[in-house]
Image: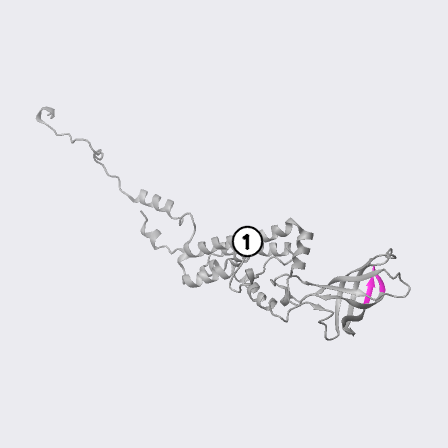
């Protein structure tokens, strides 16, 4: 039995428009509680859920949250992304990034598709294989200048690398048909680059040199964009089980936001916190009642007779 004081006290989860509370709670963890004035819970939910979500993204090198339609069906959604989408607005950019990723113009640039000269920074390795490869190669940092070159019916590239190899200044000529610049929109902030190196006259005829590395991809083109198969293979190869653990963190964040959403709309799961107080108040305010104990169900009433009455 609740008292008038307990009944008149407003419940925090009943404050404000429930439609607004539900929308805010879903979009940003803790925002619905903040709208209700429940600041402590807003801070707890926000830090725990968003920390778990972005912690998983960082562990997976920011390639854990993305959306790719299953079986090529535009309306389908994977179970992985469905769990991540429960976090709200933080996972929604992946939906729009998918549309940009699937655009036919968003494709790898190869020797046969390069139409204009391009210039971009690169960080990677100079890899040498074959006879005479000892002492050749190393870590390189610098800039690539690449231009298309038609040789008969073949498509090749020409250009040069300018920068450092193993910390020493170097300039390397580029030539050949082996060239790859990964699509501009894709998962990961590193855009894969591969380019063949021109063979000089003083090198062994079977020596093969290739520049392999990456160039930075802008935040707007990388955040929650789908990765290509090469990127996924690289992540699973380097991170192993940690990449799967990063995915699990993002799913846990989505499930936690379901609890936060429920708490914002319907209040705590284990009561309103007024039960004990109401019981105490009702017990202290109720007057003591004297009299015979209540009759036991099924028992016969005792009828007084003159023989049993005393003077």
Tally the marks.
1
Dot 1 crowding, Cα within 10 Å, few <14, some 14–19, many 20+: many
Relative to 60, residue 102 above or below: below
- Farthest residue toward the front? 153
Q: Which colour scheme is used?
A: one colour
Q: In this image, 153 relative to 93: left or right?
A: right
x and y percent of residue 126 in the render?
80, 60
- Quadrant location of residue 187? bottom right
Instruction: Give whichever of 232, 5 is nearer the camera.
Output: 232
x and y percent of residue 246 in the render?
61, 52
Give, as a single range, the part of the protein colored magenta. 162-169
Residue positioned 81% across, 68% down in the render:
174
Whether 163 is among the magenta residues is yes
Residue positioned 51% across, 64% down in the render:
75
- Farthest residue toward the bottom? 116
Q: In this image, 200 relative to 109: left or right?
A: right
Residue tagged by mark 1? 251
Q: In this image, 108 relative to 26: left or right?
A: right
Instruction: Give whichever of 105, 118 is nearer the camera.
Output: 105
Instruction: Give whichever of 195, 80 is nearer the camera.
Output: 195
Relative to 289, residue 114 above or below: below
């Amino acid at each position: 039995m609740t008292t008038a004081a307990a009944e008149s006290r407003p419940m925090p989860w009943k404050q404000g428009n429930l439609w607004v509370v539900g929308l805010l709670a879903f979009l940003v963890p803790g925002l619905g509680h903040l709208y209700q004035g429940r600041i402590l819970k807003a801070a707890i939910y926000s830090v725990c859920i968003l920390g778990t979500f972005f912690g998983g993204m960082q562990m997976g090198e920011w390639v854990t949250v993305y959306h790719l339609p299953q079986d090529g069906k535009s309306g389908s959604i994977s179970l992985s992304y469905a769990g991540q989408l429960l976090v709200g607005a933080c996972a929604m950019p992946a939906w729009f990034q998918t549309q940009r990723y699937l655009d036919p113009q968003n494709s790898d640039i190869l020797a046969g598709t390069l139409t204009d000269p391009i210039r971009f920074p690169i960080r990677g390795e100079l890899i040498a294989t074959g006879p005479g490869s000892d002492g050749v190669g190393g870590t390189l940092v610098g800039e690539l200048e690449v231009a298309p070159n038609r040789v008969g019916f073949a498509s090749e590239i020409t250009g040069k690398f300018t920068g450092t190899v193993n910390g020493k200044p170097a300039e390397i000529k580029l030539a050949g048909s082996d060239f790859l610049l990964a699509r501009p929109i894709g998962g990961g902030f590193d855009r894969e680059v591969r380019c063949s190196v021109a063979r000089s006259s003083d090198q062994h005829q079977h020596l093969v040199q290739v520049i392999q590395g990456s160039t930075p991809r802008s935040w707007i083109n990388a955040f929650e964009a789908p990765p290509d198969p090469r990127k996924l293979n690289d992540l699973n190869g380097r991170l192993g089980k940690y990449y799967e653990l990063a995915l699990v963190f993002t799913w846990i964040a989505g499930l936690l936001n379901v609890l936060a959403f429920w708490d914002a709309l319907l209040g705590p799961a284990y009561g309103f916190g007024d039960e004990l107080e109401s019981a105490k108040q009702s017990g202290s305010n109720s007057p003591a009642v004297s009299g015979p104990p209540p009759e036991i169900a099924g028992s016969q009433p005792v009828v007084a007779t003159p023989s049993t009455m005393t003077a």
